[in-house]
Image: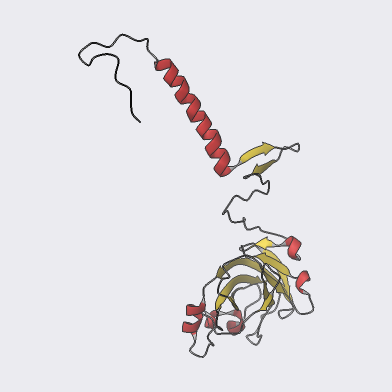
Amino acid sequence: MHQPPHPTPPTQPLPQRPSRTPFYVTVGCLSVIAGLVLGVGGFFGVRVLEGGGGTTVVENGRGDGDGDGAQPTPAALEETPVGPAGAVPLGSSFPLRSSAFDADVEVTSAAVDWDASAAIMEANSFNAEPGEGNKYVLLTIEGVHRGSSDVSDTYVSWIRTAYVAEDGTEHERAFAVTPHYSELVEQEGVEAGGAFLSEIPFELPEETEGGGHFVLHHDGQTREEGVWLSAS
């Protein structure tokens, strides 16, 4: 910005002015406080004390506790969550009845590889290429068999699975050899009280990068009666 000519010649001493240090200190402190309020409020939300002594986190006008880009926190549940309204985040722990095991299974963790085509094709040369415009997505589950009897390796699948897209389109699991095929419960079986691994592939549109739900349910149950895992 163009500055007007200085009213005092450069060789002439400037007139004495009263110190403005207290003024600048005050302004600086107020600026810092305002910055903290705006910055913390904008990025992390404001905690509002509620009547019962609990708190809720307000994020960008939302009171659900999830900020933009934040992942839901996995939960450890004692009862089986049921249906879309009871959907839980991936990684949650919950009991699940398996008709194949004739016992309960505790699902201890879950993860998703949204671009598993290369890994699945490398796992076995007989795996079919995904269709045009599609890719393989791989859901991995670790569980604990809570039954009192060992389970042999004769089961094709210990649980029925599907992926339900955000628009409601349902995709059944694909059948392909997965990267840890030899380690899976379908191959190794599991002892009573033992842990096991399961990999479940799906063939989904290439643009699928999250959203929707994975649904786990045993024979005789409808989709709505199964466990819904949020795929966000």
**Total marks in image:** 0
Q: Quadrant of the C terminus?
A: bottom right
Give the farthest residue toward the bottom.
126
Q: Nearer the viewer, residue 205 or 117?
A: 205
Q: Nearer the viewer, residue 154 or 9?
A: 9
> In the figure, residue 229 lies in which quadrant?
bottom right
* Residue displayed at 65% across by 88% down: 154
Q: Is residue 2 above or below residue 91?
A: above
> In the figure, residue 141 lies in which quadrant?
bottom right
Q: Position of residue 27 (x, y in %)?
A: 47, 22
Q: Quadrant of the N terminus?
A: top left
**Image position of 2 (left or right of 56):** left
* Residue displayed at 60% across by 70% down: 142
**In this rendering, does residue 18 appear at all?**
yes
Q: Position of residue 161 (x, y in %)?
A: 68, 76
Q: Is residue 135 above or below residue 229?
A: below
Q: Is residue 103 above or below residue 8?
A: below
Give the farthest residue toward the left.
11
Q: Nearer the viewer, residue 217 or 172?
A: 172
**Image position of 12 (left or right of 51):** left
Q: Position of residue 74 (x, y in %)?
A: 63, 58
**Image position of 88 (left or right of 23):** right
Q: Position of residue 92 (x, y in %)?
A: 64, 62
Q: Is residue 213 above or below residue 65?
A: below
* Residue displayed at 47% across by 79% down: 118
